[in-house]
Image (spheres, rainbow, N blue to C red):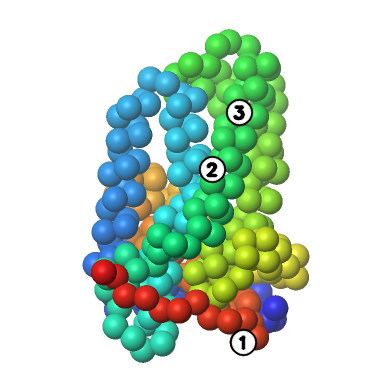
Amino acid sequence: MRQIPLLRPLGWLARGGSDLMRCPLPGLMHGAATALFGALLILLGREHFWLLAGAFSGFLIVAPLVATGLYNISRALERGRPAGLKSALAAWRPDDRRLIGFGLLLALAGTGWVLTSAALITAFAPAAVNKPADFLRVVVLAPEGWLFEAWMVLGAVLAAPVFASSVVAIPLLLDRQVGVLAAVLTSWRVVLEHPGPMAIWAALLMLLTLAGMATLLLGMIVVVPWLAHASWHAYRDLVDTTELPPQPTRAWR
């Protein structure tokens, strides 16, 4: 582990923004695809709260995996190599099953969150929650009770280990020849040894994501690639990989 100052996450955002401006097309394409996917989820699940909540929760949890191609662009820019859409596509190697396995683990975590929160709301809500409007009326705007607060605390408790397991794991898997378990344990060490900076980083990720959603998802076009590139620089600042064998750089064919 490398030691970093408390406010280093702000520097990750600055460098992530620089990468996005240097190579904007792949990032904006990722962001636009995210916004369109979110709009489709809202269209299909607007009358089914748990379907909508599950889809969004699952997507947010696996979003670091979706951004793998953008990590590869930041790696190429860092090394002075050509970077573009081909660089993003080259990150998805069909013979590398580590990222697929890790993505399945993240998807299981998202499913567990939805099932657990659904059980909490179903057991303690004073009325049935079937639609988004029901959740807003019965849970969020309830004049009394503790259900919304408990739901938020439960979400934080379940999200914390997912964040700790993935914050640098996927860039590490992309960059170096390590196993999934080693990447996850490294990610946990990062969080345990840098609680202050990582708490700030988690808050920035959440606030910027919420801001992107609050703009009718249009902000996600920029937020998604910005945070993806910044996450690469977080990994590079936090983990000393000089003793680890690198992954070979491959071109898209």
In the image shown, does 236 or 177 lie closer to the viewer? 177
Q: Residue at x 29, y 83 (%)?
A: 82
In the image shown, does 192 or 14 lie closer to the viewer? 192
Q: Can residue 124 be seen in this snapshot?
A: yes
Q: Which residue is mark 2?
A: 107
Query: Which of the two discs, 1 and 3, sits closer to the camera?
Result: 1
Answer with left or right where residue 107 lies relative to residue 239.
left
CB under 8 Å between callouts 1 and 2? no
Q: What's the residue type where badge 3 is placed?
A: Leu
Q: Please tell me whether mark 2 sits on a helix, a strand or a loop.
A: helix
Q: What's the residue type where badge 1 is placed?
A: Thr
- Mark 1 or mark 3: whose residue is earlier in sequence: 3
Number of other residues with Cα within 10 Å of mark 2, as a class: few under 14, some 14 to 19, many 20 or more: some
Q: Please tell me whether mark 1 sits on a helix, a strand or a loop.
A: loop
Task: Return the x and y of residue 161 as percentages of the image width and height.
Answer: 68, 51
Q: Residue at x 34, y 32 (%)?
A: 42
Asked if 18 appears above or below 112 in the picture, the reply is below
Q: Residue at x 28, y 61 (%)?
A: 28
Q: Which residue is mark 3?
A: 115
Q: Can residue 24 be seen in this snapshot?
A: no
Residue, far front: 95
Q: CA distance from mark 1 to mark 2?
A: 31 Å
Q: Which circle marks residue 242 in the picture?
A: 1
- Mark 1 or mark 2: whose residue is earlier in sequence: 2
